[in-house]
Amino acid sequence: MTIGTPLLDALIQALGDSAVLRSDADMAGYTEDWRGRYKGAALCVALPGSTRQVADIVRLCNDYATPVLPQGGNTSLCGGAVPDEAGPPPVIVNLSRLRQIRRVDPANNSMEVEAGCVLATVQQAAAEQGRLYPISLGAEGSCQIGGTIATNAGGTGVLRYGNTRDNILGLEVVLPDGSIWNGLTALRKNNTGFDLKHLFIGAEGTLGIVTAAVLKLHPLPNRHAIAWLAPTDPQAALDILGLFQQQCGSRLSAFEMIDSNQLDIVMTHVPGRKNPLPGAHPWHVLVELSDTGSGAELQEVLQQILEQAFELGLLRDAVVASNDSQRAALWEVRHSVSEGNKKAGVGLTTDSAVPVSSVPRFIAAATEAVRRLVPDLPILIVAHLGDGNVHFIPFFTFDAWNALPERDAMAAAIRRAVNDVADALGGTFSAEHGVGRTSLAEMAHYKSPVELAMMRTLKASFDPAALFNPGRLLP
Amino acid sequence: MTIGTPLLDALIQALGDSAVLRSDADMAGYTEDWRGRYKGAALCVALPGSTRQVADIVRLCNDYATPVLPQGGNTSLCGGAVPDEAGPPPVIVNLSRLRQIRRVDPANNSMEVEAGCVLATVQQAAAEQGRLYPISLGAEGSCQIGGTIATNAGGTGVLRYGNTRDNILGLEVVLPDGSIWNGLTALRKNNTGFDLKHLFIGAEGTLGIVTAAVLKLHPLPNRHAIAWLAPTDPQAALDILGLFQQQCGSRLSAFEMIDSNQLDIVMTHVPGRKNPLPGAHPWHVLVELSDTGSGAELQEVLQQILEQAFELGLLRDAVVASNDSQRAALWEVRHSVSEGNKKAGVGLTTDSAVPVSSVPRFIAAATEAVRRLVPDLPILIVAHLGDGNVHFIPFFTFDAWNALPERDAMAAAIRRAVNDVADALGGTFSAEHGVGRTSLAEMAHYKSPVELAMMRTLKASFDPAALFNPGRLLP
């Protein structure tokens, strides 16, 4: 046990001894990220059991000028949720005990949940009422609603349902001064002044701590049609996307593209994954239609559009899943990407987005830019094509990576080269992962002075002592 | 012509003589609202021809500490866009000359337009590319995009496509210090810091002047099915809404409810309107399904759901439009509401919203509350039921209104009574019209001190001299 400080003593008094973790062993799961890339020191990990206790913690941290680091499921890919070595050790405020589903209102298509609810638990509670909470991503079994809100999480449902931001009706937030903002409205329309919830969505905990939210629900789709396509190239994939959008509207629920390098890695490194199509193809698309209600026409519509795409010369091959297990198998291939890559080598994953219409140009130009730095380097493409979001992954085998003389500098140079291409096309260096600490240099480099000034103005107004998640988001 | 002041001289030098209106006659269309309810004095009306000129105006107004009143099509229902008599006369910055459609990108489903573009013009330009810009409202022939953004305009498309806020990808804004923020991204995903555009959407010009925007487009629906229903009561209407949502998902594009009082007024006062159903019914719903692509099943789905509703005892009668002219006729009835009411008497229209599930309780309780003040007063109901948005209209004949001893006090008391009911159900006093100057007292009354403090903090950070649209939005 560490030696008590006045703040620790006050926190223990406010929360109880068992809710204030102080030993290195107890704090280990909170001070290091899940991939083992970031680790830092914390004064303690506070585990509040109520919004009121979160406010108590914040007020105490203010009294002792101690930084506050809000934390959910600790699944950040950007080092956004664990401490670093700069500045005084923060109090980690982990929200996992705030895990009550306060209310489900099926007739209003909404539910009110606490920040520590695990995303999959929320999806399940919605499904039990015949409703869908549409945010879906790899970490859904452990990430928490508060974290998905703080990072405006994306995932595979964005094409149809938007980002997390688009699925939030109301928020409850503990502000940096310790006051509690109750913005838990469940309204579809509310034009009464600034829409304050948007300040906190995607702010990565720098403006306050989200403690609860009212989520927007949707009818639960009960019919799906899914196919695996081999388009001739990215432009053909885009043209096929256009056919689906025009003919299926919002029944198009996924349009995910990967390249053959990426598929090969999954086939080689993830046991049990089956290549959806015979033969070798350079590009692959998983397309899914979803709908509510009765009727079987989804499968027909899918078939018809694929026939059109064949006739237009856009497709090399395609297979349509004819039952649920085939459907699951196709999604498994897509979902095995991270596992395969982790086993196969070192990927310098970017999180680029460009206008959807510019994706083919982006892939071509970014490939060229990276190859100028490392000739013949394999590139993996994992694209949420319908959102213009491309995870462009220059990929090293472990041997090639270990043989590099200046790894950090090479990684930075490659990322900058890719981000430059995205920027020139009106794109971004972080589509869905956020900024955290990994992209601070990109923020400083790509954001305009006017925009950075506005962000700093906001930060200074809400958190004048700069105690909330310092060293994150804002360069 | 008025006598020149240093600011007027500087504005004329910056914009040219013809772009600075100074005479009362020239300014008349800008200093009074379209309903003739609000009128005030202005120093001049500036008609900038470019974003750069907007910035010049703002800097000059700063130099001379003169208020700035941004104005679009001047269609506000809340007195939000015309000057009042308080404080020094402002410079009205009317955006109507910024009316270029800069770019349409069908493959990205986006278009970039200047703030002065009329909404109907934008809808038309999107339609020419087979795309839909889904914001649709009564004033669409004259309101401007900038105004719809500043007020987060709603309308009849919200159920399917969301409010204006949900259809904005990027903004260009002249900030109160005269700097220009270029936030004109056309991205579906962009998690790089605070999402600043949301500050300005719905801010009613109090934080800056929107000069251009990137709008989100959707596939243009080419199939529609529409019916006029007589549900037994509001709860039955809600149950029918649930059937449609579960079975049609996002193909449900409108679900508008009016009561028999409202329908009677339209039939009596608007020539050419035909009662959609024979016989008298207390409640009426217009339901519309829309879809893209081919196939005729929409009509069948509509029929099936209506049969279910009959079997469940939810419906008294229904008629399905069988061609485009019948479809138009049904919408005409709905769209004639304002015209009918204007001819028939004085309606104290509220703009309430409650959770969708609470609409029946709201209507019953608000009716009771109003009748406690004025026994037997007719109530008109015009509800965007799918959004929980109810225009609850206590209605006086001209004679009854003119006979009232204390009209203003009575109007205020009635509105407060209705708003109290909405508030108690977790609702709002302004769902889609905004605050302007008409609802300042409601802002002060219903918003929590924490929320008002946050809003004032924002306002003070971005507009420390409080020159932008003073006396609006913030009490």
Image (cartoon, coloured by chain):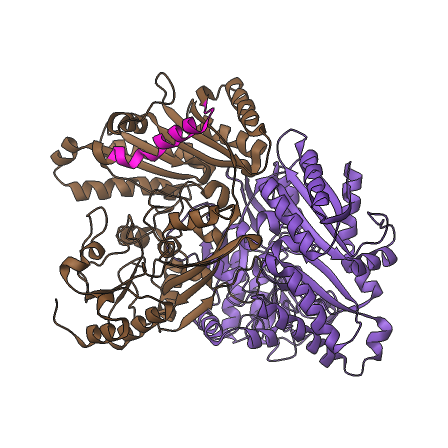
Chain colours: A brown, B purple
Q: Is residue A273 visible?
A: yes
Magenta residues, dominant SS class:
helix
Identify the residue shown where x is 62% and y is 35%. Answer: B292
The image shows residue B442 at horizontal and vertical percentages of: 60, 74
Quadrant where the image shows the N terminus of chain A: bottom left
Magenta range is: A320-341
Identify the residue shown where x is 85% and y is 71%. Answer: B398
Residue placed most toward the observer, B94 or A393: A393
Q: Quadrant of residue B145?
A: bottom right
Residue placed most toward the observer, A37 or B393: B393
Residue placed most toward the observer, A77 or A213: A213
Residue placed most toward the observer, A100 or B94: A100
Q: Is residue B140 visible?
A: no
Quadrant where the image shows the C terminus of chain A: bottom left
Q: A305 left or right of A285?
A: right
The image shows residue A468 at horizontal and vertical percentages of: 30, 65
Looking at the image, residue B257 lies above or below residue A63: above
